[in-house]
Amino acid sequence: MKKNINLFKNPKVKMVIILSFLLFIYITICAFSYAQNISSDIANSVFRLHVIANSDSTEDQNLKLKVRDNLLEFMNELCINCKTKQDAILLVEENKETFKQIALDTIKNEGYSYDVKINIGNFEFPTKQYGDISLPAGYYDALRVEIGNAEGKNWWCVMFPPLCFVDISSGIVPDDSKELLKESLNEEEFTLISDNSDEKIHFKFKLLEFFNKNGLITAKK
């Protein structure tokens, strides 16, 4: 024990410890800054849809999917010429009541009387894969649709660029959607979300995911 204490009194050892500690702090700050910038750029490039079911019953979950399908059909027609996320959000804002009415009509046609709440805001999402595109956990702008008590499992996708219609059988995102993402992200950011097979890219994605999941990167101001 005394030997260890004396070792720490050695100026050279003390200097190594201090430098190692400062290096650790520097690396942590750089990693956090990198993750924050990447997370912000990715979040600023997509607009998501979040539909929450009334409950976890089979009937309510099936109803949620029908509401989703009708909302997506309208969104696909509405934003067919959108080139940016801002264009999509603006159109959704202008047609917010129409989205609500579509949801209410779907619910009524299925024999239910649930109310619907529609909000456009910045919400937390888990890591999610859409075909060959993966989005890290974090805060994203989204259209949130709450059915009834909104106590059931939720469903989410990306309304812009349109990743909601990924061909599940092939697991491939349409080229048009990828091009819209490429225009909003730099090369490294796009590679990060579209190809995690490389160990270096996979590590960066996990780093970004770690900071987001642990609340170190929070909602936008």
Image (spheres, rainbow, N blue to C red):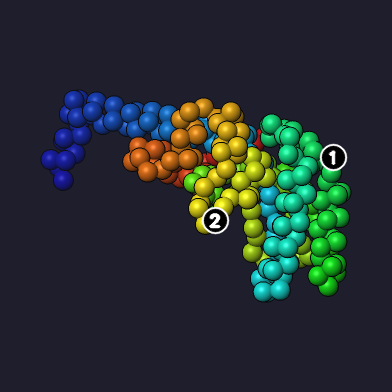
Q: Say which of 139 and 163 sits in front.
A: 163
Q: Quadrant of the C terminus?
A: top right
Classify 10 Å Cα crowding around label 2: few (below 14), some (14-19), many (20 and above): few
SS of the residue under disc 2: loop
Residue under the image location 69 percent in, 68 percent down: 62
Residue under the image location 76 percent in, 56 percent down: 70
Q: Position of residue 2 (x, y in %)?
A: 15, 42
Image-based side of 207 in relation to 218, left or right: left
Look at the image and tell me whether residue 40 can be seen.
no
How far separated are the C-alphas under marks 1 and 2? 31 Å
Q: Say which of 35 and 83 sits in front.
A: 83
Q: Position of residue 73 (x, y in %)?
A: 74, 51
Q: Quadrant of residue 61?
A: bottom right
Q: Amino acid at mark 1?
A: Glu
Residue under the image location 23 percent in, 28 percent down: 16
Q: Earlier in the sequence, mark 1 or mark 2?
A: 1
Q: Which mark is residue 94?
A: 1
Q: Position of residue 92 (x, y in %)?
A: 79, 42
Image-based side of 43 in relation to 136, left or right: right
Image-based side of 160 in relation to 109, left or right: left
The residue pinned by badge 2 equals 168
SS of the residue under disc 1: helix
Where 111 falls versus 194 (above or below)? below
